[in-house]
Image (spheres, coloured by chain):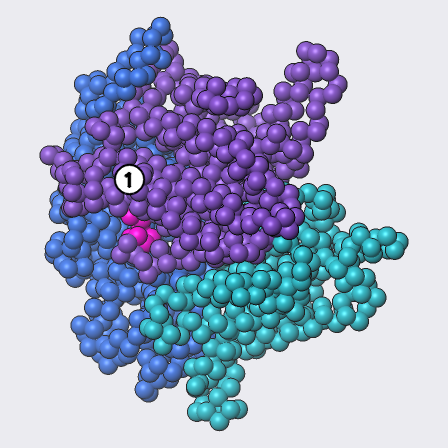
Amino acid sequence: MFGLAKKDATLLLVVVGLTLLAPFILNPFPTDSAMAQFNAGYPDLMQRFVIFGIFAIGFNILFGLTGYLSFGHAAFLGVGSYSAVWMFKLLSMNVIPAIALSVVVAGLFSLLIGYVSLRRSGIYFSILTLAFAQMSFNLAYSVLTPITNGETGLQLTLNDPRVLGISQTADGSIPVTGLFGLEMRSTYTMDVGAWAFQFNVGYYLCAVALLVAFYLAIRIFRSPFGLMLRAVKSNQQRMNYTGLNTRPYTLAAFVISGMYAGLAGGLMASMDPLAGAERMQWTASGEVVLMTILGGAGTLIGPVLGAGFIKYFENIFSKINDNVLHGWFSFMPDGLENFVITIIHPFIGKGWHLTLGLLFMMVVIFLPGGLVEGGQRIAALFKRGKKDDDGADTSKATTPAE
Amino acid sequence: MDAIILQILNGLDKGSAYALIALGLTLIFGTLGVVNFAHGALFMIGAFCAVTLQRILSLSTVTLSKTETNFLGQPAEIKTPYVESWFGPEAGAAIIDWSVPLAILFSIPVMIAIGFIMERGLIKHFYKRPHADQILVTFGLAIVLQEVIKYFYGANPIPTGAPEVFKGSFDFGVLLGFDPNAIIYPYWRLVYFGFSALIISAVFAFLQFTTFGMVVRAGMADRETVGLLGINIDKRFTIMFGLAAAVAGLAGVMYAPINSPNYHMGMDFLVLSFVVVVVGGMGSLPGAVLAGFMLGILESFASMNEIKSLIPGIDQIIIYVVAILILLTRPRGLMGRKGVMEE
Amino acid sequence: MSTSNFTRRGLLKTSAVAGAGLALPTYLSAANHAGYTNAPQGDTVTLGFNVPQSGPYADEGADELRAYELAVEHLNGGGDGGMMNTFSSKELTGNGILGKKVEYVTGDTQTKSDAARASAKSMIEKDGAVMITGGSSSGVAIAVQGLCQEAGIIFMAGLTHSNDTTGKDKKANGFRHFFNGYMSAAALAPVLKNLYGTDRNAYHLTADYTWGWTQEESIAAATEAMGWNTVNKVRTPLASTDFSSYIAPVLNSGADVLVLNHYGGNMVNSLTNAVQFGLRDKQVNGKNFEIVVPLYSRLMAKGAGANVKGIHGSTNWHWSLQDDASKAFVKSFGTKYGFPPSQAAHTVYCQTMLYADAAQRAGTFNPCGIAEALEGFEFDGLGNGKTLYRAADHQCFKDVLVVRGKENPTSEFDLLEVVEVTPAAQVTYEPDHPMFAGGALGTCNPGA
């Protein structure tokens, strides 16, 4: 199907199912129950899952295939967002031109940075990309404020000179982003018993973008071009000795992944028209590196899982406070309740970083191939149960890409 | 001219912090081949060794005042540090005053122990794993260490002063024939510079002149062969890790009076120290030190008003511009060796 | 809990497919939502407290959170009532807001505009918060204020000192109780004139981002108006930790006053470095060299230790104030937590009370009703004397405190002493003052 092998087609179908049904899957708990805290099925977070998924898929095309570890990919996401917001300010509130421009600008920017940085390899390459990204961040935060609005971030105002569109609506507010009249933020809520499922236009636009991005990534992984990139990873020197110039291939991978980042940035701005400089900071670049490794570098689905994992903890765990804990454990006797809460307290709310750090360590210690390997082990368990097949392939751990 | 001399001093001072951190980082890079994102956290823990010792020394008996009241109108608490009641008020106050230099002694065993535990408990299992895994696990560890410190000490910076005798500044100008007060430099920063120079020389001497150092250097060059020769390189690597941790920790202890320590100071230095190490060249200790001082001085020059007015914002990016230029002209940094971390 | 929606103007037709065969889908229309976003249903109302819980301002955020919890307790009739007893408006009775029990959700802004907006959005979309409040930096406040305007939610700003929050970036749904850079300058200038005379040369070190710039502009304008000369204005990168290379040039610049337009960690480090370089012991042009920190925060001043002694600055509120309201608040907060509240805690407590009172007076949680009740509202008894919430820009006008680092602190909280209470009239400016021009409030947005 779509020119994919059966296994890939199945994977794609699974991803299609997961993304389209996300409002159900991510909202397993009734709205009024104590566990509703763990529901992630609200538009903003679902959008973030998908957008960072795209970002990580793109990053993985470079890192997973060629082994080139870029520490500056957030810069492309940043310029993508800035271009999109400028498009909203100057041209129209339609998301199509904005997203198109962000992909193009991010592509050009990554062509420039990639052309220079790819002259070196290994850690020297990483530091070059880091240096470019940090320069972009520092300048965007200070000297380039007329373009980026610095600390506050670039926002829409009531007197933007929008060429195709209105500066402000009839009731004096800023128009919202949309796709030919379909507002990105409009949400339809379906109440089913105690559950409330939210279907958001913006989310589905992002989801479609993710599916296209994912499909393209599969095609790239399976193409001769992808094979060439893998060859670069396993032994670039040998490739060079055979008289083949690998630079155009790696540069192409760099630009493609930069354009993915630009797409993510453009989508982010389309969902919420704000572009902040800290999107380009090294911590943001580091985050996508972590997402990819956490999920499983070089695998197709891994980066998406990693992105979801980190964003989930950031947004859900940071919001659990002692008050919520008291709600959960109120069934216990007072002394025990307070004891349990004292134990959990450091890991939630303002301690969400601690939980995340611990989980990073656990995953990498126990699941060397990332979350994908966790999935494979579980799958292998089931297989074993069914067929009593002891050969649950451990070989996969080393080459999860296959 | 005086401005330039001052900025050179500033640069040397900043450079010594960069150089010390980069030295430890490159020891770990070079000897163990591990990308250690938790190195900044070790620097931070060093600074908190100073804070902790200051707190321990200031542990006090609490009595309620009969005359004074606190903000709620209740009797105020009067705290008398134990050291003051034991050694008399003056000697006790002097001990508390000298807590940062004392923390040097305190931090060495602590940092070496932390280094050992880290290496034996965690890093050891990652020697053969890809760099990506090392990044993830050490980054996770850095977050955990940072959050633990935050949990106990809060997020705000904690003032940790140098001893009273080091307050004030040294007048360089007079020495060089300038007007008095034209070029003055704080004593403690001079101490910091001297201390760094001492530590750096000690590390070099250790690696250069001892048998242990020779083996480690051999191990850096070719680990397998050294292993085949029947030398237990693993044990030596553990010791190297402890040493690197101690160097980072000492850099942190002495840094505490310059800027009040806070829990994220390690992350602030982390990226910079990676840049320093790579600009210096992978696997080269002299390279790391050289790059540290060079970037420190260039950064100081770039923040001069004359230069800022010429190129606005240059002080924001100078380090990265220099890093890019050096890496493009010298493929392996200033003094990097072939084949280290190039894949 | 209400099912939250950003808007119902557009319907997603495709989802009808998914809805088929399941229970009857309910379109939450404006009608059953009383015409505004997240109208409280049932007997509770949810407020969103969005404060920095990680990053450099985490302690400030924690103090804000304490004050919020205290305010909620008081609104629901618990505790000793705090400033509810001294507040000039007597609408609040300890019976929640409009008879609904106050509940709250918390989030982490990480002091990043992106993260702050994500957190605020989750409060609006998931938890059904009807008001968002908090923040410990102007960038975050402005970003979240913009979001709340779009979503149709009231935003009660926390600690934000930039002129822009109620200047060029003001929004109809956003309100600020905290003072701003202009007010700091207007309050400080006369005090500095009395202390240091009119013949001074000032050197500015400024954090290189919007807040720093607006404060630098305000202070430079106010001091130049009284005859001071500005020698230099130097921008320092936000990420700086060591300010030595910026401090060193001050030594021989001929300046005799150093103005540090820094906040938080930047302030702690630049002040510590300036004192290290002996600036305080210096004599220039026959005068003592002086340092000024226009925006003081007690929590942060603690990080600079003894270096703050004798250094002047301004603050929104300080726990040592002796009016009844401040005393009541300090007592209530101190009894619960064991230490006095910070200015950040004070401003967010006031904001919560002001919101609750406005809702009570308006008889609705509709943002437009609340905005109307707050606009032009004059009140007293919240610790800053008589205060006006100006309709033109949603900024509070009240007394500003000029403070000085205390020479002989009696406790670890006793770091600042109030030098002068500058009356509100002196810090008031026209809404179209050039430093605040360039934006428009727009119209209030009830969302839905």
What residue is disc 1 on? A98
Q: How many marks?
A: 1
Residue appearing at x 60%, y 62% in the figure: B332
Q: Is residue A219 above or below residue C411?
A: above
Q: Which chain is assigned purple? A: A
Q: Is C17 in front, or is C264?
A: C17
Residue A259, can we see it?
A: yes
> Residue B325: x and y, percent?
49, 65
> Residue B159: x and y, percent?
51, 62
Residue C296 lies left or right of residue B140; in this view the side is left
Q: Is residue B60 magenta?
A: no
Residue appearing at x 32%, y 16% in the figure: C15
Q: Which chain is assigned blue? A: C
Residue A2 lies left or right of residue C373; in this view the side is right
Q: Residue furthest bottom?
A: B177
Residue A49, can we see it?
A: no
Residue appearing at x 44%, y 85% in the figure: B2
Rendering quarter of residue A176 = top left
Residue C221 lies left or right of residue C74; in this view the side is left
Q: Residue furthest top?
A: C21
Give the colour of chain B. cyan
Could you tell me which secondary element the residue under label 1 belongs to?
helix
Q: Is residue A153 magenta?
A: yes
> Residue A50: x and y, percent?
42, 31
Residue appearing at x 44%, y 38% in the figure: A55
Q: Is B236 in front, or is C221?
A: B236
Rendering quarter of residue B220 = bottom right
Q: Crowding at label 1, few (<14), some or many (≥20) Cα neighbours within 10 Å? A: many
Chain letter of the residue beneath label 1 in the structure image: A
**Magenta residues, start to end:** A148-156
Identify the amino acid type marked 1.
Answer: Ala
